[in-house]
Amino acid sequence: VASGNPGSRATGGCDSRPEHENAGEIGDASGASLGGVDTSSDTMVAVRNIPCKYMASDIARILDEKGLVGLYNFVYTPVCVKGRKLTNRGYAFVDFKRPCYMEKCHNALSGRPFGFNMSPKLVEVELANVPPGPLLLK
């Protein structure tokens, strides 16, 4: 599990104010959506069609390079062993600090290849269909 860079401050809230200035506000994420689906209470997305060579730390680095540094809590990447290699299963879950950051992720990643690779796969970002509890078990 990789997390957003804790040493860096988010560049701004969904309404362009720094996150600490939004602290304590209720309903400040109203109108958040992802692909036309209301996401005002959801914060986790599934990022699909990720090349199998990327682990959670690689995915977090690419998210940061795409301008999402400081906007997410963690990245979870299910893995499997193929032969002697550890690979991901082609998807990852990203939990964002605020629902409106999911749209930023969607805009930055969807319909494009993920990272630097020769794969013809194009990323799909969609609302995760997994309760966050099982991902946080240690």
Image (cartoon, grey):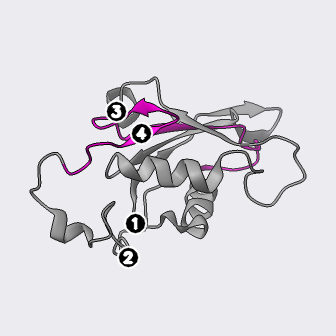
Amino acid type at mark 2? Ser
Alpha-carbon span between mark 4 and mark 2: 26 Å
Mark nearer the viewer, 4 or 1: 4
Query: Alpha-carbon neighbours of circle 3 within 10 Å: few (<14), some, or many (≥20)?
Result: few
Q: Position of residue 59 (x, y in %)?
A: 61, 54
| Magenta-colored span | 28-56
Alpha-carbon span between mark 4 and mark 1: 20 Å
Q: Which mark is residue 70?
A: 1
Mark nearer the viewer, 2 or 3: 2
Which residue does the numbered mark 4 point to in the structure image?
33
Q: Secondary structure at mark 2?
A: loop
Amino acid type at mark 3? Leu
Q: Dots 1 and 2: beta carbons under 8 Å? A: yes
N-terminal label among 3 and 1: 1
User: Would residue 33 be counted in the magenta stretch?
Assistant: yes
Query: Alpha-carbon neighbours of circle 2 within 10 Å: few (<14), some, or many (≥20)?
Result: few
